[in-house]
Image (cartoon, rainbow, N blue to C red):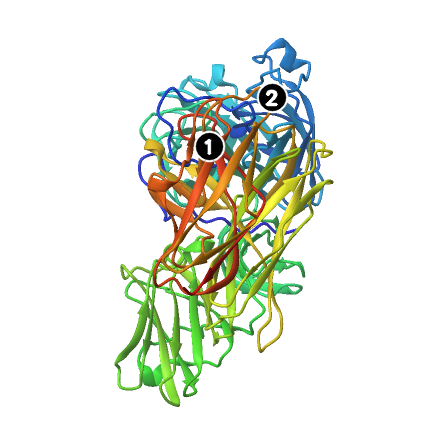
């Protein structure tokens, strides 16, 4: 199993990296003015994990908690293989009924679990979910480490004169849990010994559903006299890393704190303290699944004259990954690499950016290069064919490179043909059709003219094949017995692909089904309705939404990338890619939504009415908002409506008051709405969990056709 490297991070006040905005379902839709009715059914929103590390080959007891009710939790689901978990008890702060594992009527804001890691489990952060009768939780993360785990003793390590004594090596699991919290750790170093201190903190908060403030950690190293020897901030995005070679044997101290001395009980971290091999960079960065690669590495406690080995599993996902390397001195922590099936090549020396001297290259290729010094510009010359569409993409920042790359195409006369920057975060991508036969040079440079050993990149260059990317919204589908929820799908078409895309939701729990969906040629959005029968019992499984299309080169098959909903300060809404999608059958939901008719035929310029009734469960009497598009604060995140069809708001009844049972949706086709043979939509009913978060339920699919007058 390989975990894709997630190379984005959010800081407390400012986003350090861009965040993709696509839809999810545990939604914040139209806000209902206070007072807001609280839904009786809510999935748990995971916010804290402590300790946040487990040593492979061992088991650890861990506290997991957040917002919502964790009572009655039944199981844990993990990304990949090698990790298993069991629920122990609710934490001591829970109510008595919750501690006994009571279901719906008990309330537990946290639980204790036991996580076991196999001896061969892949190192690094891994996603997991808590499964309860109310559904699957939002994403949490646990870091698998090779070092023994030491748990912070907060009563000891606040004292700079003492500090908590830790061994070398170790992985220290702590929390910057209060304002002005300072965590001091003391350790013994030998003369000439190099020790690396690497922290996971801010990066573990990327996927947290509702964490309004974020750890911005810093590391400071001191000798026995209190003199600062080294400090680091923002080495791995917002997380620090420092290495130091100690001149004299003795006891030293390492300090972990927030840069502004802020704190939060949810700010867990793991500080890895290593005297073993530690690779900062590896070259080449491109590797092939199913092969063993020999890489030149730079770092600490490593013989840089001898190559390291990376064994790439045959099932490795294409794109950014993280792999441990084997050296003559042992195994390194995971190193960012790029898995690809394209032929591999490397920059020979320093590829000059003068057209005549540029490094000769051939399509297709995954070319590993490095901007080795300030003002370095690398040039690679390709022979292009008239009328051929080519794609060029740089993977750099996504695999931890310091580069902010700019991609430029130049012809033999030195004229710029195309340029790209910041398509995937800081990484560029472009498509270009050759106007004639002849050579073209690809130039790679850093936006700020920087360079060095940490400025590696991989250039993917090939004759573009029709292709697409798929995302789905949400990453967790919690559906109550006898109810339905919507799953929104988006297709990003690439390289001239215009074909239809069909979808299948695989891995569903018993008595849970999903409606069929085919997004027609040229379409970009669609809807799958997930339904649970009245016989469905609480349970969950990791599921995959598989997308398939035909192309001249053969079938194209991709899994959809799930998006985790991230609530931002002030009630804003962002999304973050996650690796796992969970479908859970739950206790009966607050409501079920019924709508008729099941087919709507709209003539251009005319309207049609959908009658809606709400079936209320378990005594739920709160208000319900109706919608056909996924939106928040005026921004539409997903819309399955056919082109030219809109909701006629002034004629619709979308706010169903407390205790009321009926509403209506009026759809209107514009006079110029193009004919449509049939597009599935649904009517959603949104129930408030709190002032921001909503849970969405929906009707069966409704087929909407548009015909000429």
Could you say which is closer to the camera, residue 54 or residue 66? 66
Could you say which is closer to the camera, residue 366 or residue 530? 530
Q: Residue furthest front?
A: 709
Is 559 displayed left or right of 369 in the figure?
A: right
The residue drawn where x is 58% and y is 18% is 108
Q: Are marks 1 and 2 in contact (CB under 8 Å)?
A: no
Assign a secondary structure to mark 1. Answer: strand
Q: Nearer the viewer, mark 1 or mark 2?
A: 2
The residue identified by callout 1 is: 694
Q: Is residue 333 above or below residue 45?
A: below
Which image quarter is the C terminus in? bottom left
Indicate the position of residue 632 as horizontal and vertical percent values.
38, 39
Work out whether mark 1 precedes mark 2 in sequence or the reverse, and give the earlier one: 2
**Would you identify the image quadrant in which residue 557 lies?**
bottom right
- Graded by Cα atoms within 10 Å as few (under 14), some (14 to 19) or many (20 or more), the crowding at tag 1 reads many
The residue drawn where x is 31% and y is 74% is 418
Indicate the position of residue 467 as horizontal and vertical percent values.
52, 68
Q: Is residue 191 visible?
A: no
Could you say which is closer to the camera, residue 628 or residue 666? 666
Is 381 displayed left or right of 298 in the figure?
A: left
Is 294 displayed left or right of 421 in the figure?
A: right
Could you tell me how far apart the alpha carbons at marks 1 and 2 are, in whole angstroms?
Answer: 18 Å
Badge number at residue 618? 2
Indicate the position of residue 559 as horizontal and vertical percent values.
59, 56
The residue drawn where x is 43% and y is 47% is 8
Q: Is residue 296 visible?
A: yes
Q: Residue furthest bottom?
A: 437
Indicate the position of residue 701 as horizontal and vertical percent values.
57, 48
The residue drawn where x is 62% and y is 59% is 309
Could you say which is closer to the camera, residue 255 or residue 177? 177
């Amino acid at each position: 199993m390989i975990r894709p490297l997630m190379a984005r991070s959010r800081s407390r006040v400012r986003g350090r990296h861009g965040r993709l905005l696509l839809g999810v379902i545990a939604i914040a839709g139209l806000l209902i003015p206070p007072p807001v009715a609280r839904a009786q059914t809510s999935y748990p929103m995971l916010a804290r994990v402590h300790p946040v590390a487990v040593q492979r080959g061992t088991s650890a007891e861990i506290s997991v908690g957040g917002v919502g009710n964790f009572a009655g939790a039944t199981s844990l689901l993990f990304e990949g293989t090698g990790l298993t978990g069991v629920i122990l008890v609710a934490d001591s702060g829970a109510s008595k009924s919750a501690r006994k594992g009571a279901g719906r009527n008990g309330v537990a804001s946290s639980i204790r679990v036991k996580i076991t890691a196999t001896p061969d489990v892949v190192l690094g952060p891994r996603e997991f979910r808590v499964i309860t009768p109310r559904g699957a939780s939002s994403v949490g993360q646990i870091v698998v480490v090779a070092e023994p785990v030491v748990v912070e003793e907060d009563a000891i390590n606040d004292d700079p004169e003492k500090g908590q004594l830790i061994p070398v090596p170790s992985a220290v699991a702590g929390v910057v849990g209060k304002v002005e919290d300072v965590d001091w750790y003391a350790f013994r170093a030998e003369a000439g010994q190099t020790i690396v201190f690497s922290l996971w903190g801010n990066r573990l908060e990327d996927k947290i559903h509702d964490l309004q403030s974020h750890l911005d950690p810093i590391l400071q190293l001191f000798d026995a006299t209190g003199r600062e020897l080294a400090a680091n901030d923002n080495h791995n995005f917002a997380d620090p890393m420092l290495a130091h070679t100690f001149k004299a044997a003795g006891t030293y101290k390492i300090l972990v704190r927030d840069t502004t001395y802020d704190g939060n009980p949810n700010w867990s971290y793991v500080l890895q303290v290593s005297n073993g091999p530690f690779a900062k960079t590896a070259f080449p960065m491109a590797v092939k699944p199913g092969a063993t690669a020999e890489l030149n590495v730079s770092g600490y406690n490593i013989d840089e004259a001898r190559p390291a080995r990376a064994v790439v599993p045959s099932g490795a996902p294409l794109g950014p990954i993280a792999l441990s390397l084997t050296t003559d001195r042992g195994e390194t922590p995971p190193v960012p690499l790029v898995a690809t099936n394209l032929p591999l090549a490397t920059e020979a020396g320093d590829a000059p950016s003068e057209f005549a001297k540029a490094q000769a290259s051939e399509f297709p290729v995954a070319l590993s290069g490095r901007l080795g010094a300030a003002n370095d510009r690398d040039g690679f010359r390709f022979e292009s064919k008239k009328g051929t569409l080519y794609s060029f993409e740089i993977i750099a920042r996504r695999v931890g490179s310091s580069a902010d790359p700019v991609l430029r195409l130049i012809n033999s006369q030195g004229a710029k043909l195309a340029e790209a920057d910041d398509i995937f975060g800081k990484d560029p991508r472009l498509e270009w059709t050759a106007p004639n036969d002849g050579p073209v040079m690809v130039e790679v440079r850093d936006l700020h003219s920087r360079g060095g050993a940490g400025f590696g990149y991989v250039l993917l260059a090939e004759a573009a094949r029709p292709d697409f990317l798929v995302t789905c919204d949400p990453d967790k589908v919690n559906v109550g017995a006898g109810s339905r929820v919507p799953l929104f799908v988006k297709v990003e078409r690439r390289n001239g692909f215009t074909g239809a895309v069909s979808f299948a939701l695989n891995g569903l729990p018993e008595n849970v089904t999903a409606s069929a969906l085919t997004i027609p040629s040229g379409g970009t959005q669609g809807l799958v309705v997930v339904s649970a029968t009245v016989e469905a019992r609480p349970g969950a499984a990791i599921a995959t939404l598989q997308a398939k299309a035909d192309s001249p080169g053969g079938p194209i098959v991709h899994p959809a990338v799930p998006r985790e909903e991230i609530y931002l300060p002030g009630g804003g809404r962002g999304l973050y890619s996650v690796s796992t999608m969970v479908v859970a059958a739950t206790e009966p939901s607050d409501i079920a939504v019924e709508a008729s008719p099941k087919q709507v035929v709209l003539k251009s310029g005319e309207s049609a009415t959908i009658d809606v009734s709400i079936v209320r469960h378990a005594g739920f009497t709160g208000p319900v908002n109706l919608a056909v598009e996924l939106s928040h604060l005026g921004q539409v995140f997903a819309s399955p409506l056919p082109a030219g069809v809109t909701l006629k708001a002034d004629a619709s009844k979308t706010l169903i008051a407390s205790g009321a049972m009926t509403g209506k949706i009026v759809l209107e086709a514009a006079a110029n709405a193009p004919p449509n043979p049939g597009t599935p939509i649904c009517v959603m009913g949104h129930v408030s969990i709190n002032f921001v978060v909503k849970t969405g339920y929906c009707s069966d699919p409704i087929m909407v056709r548009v015909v000429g007058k």
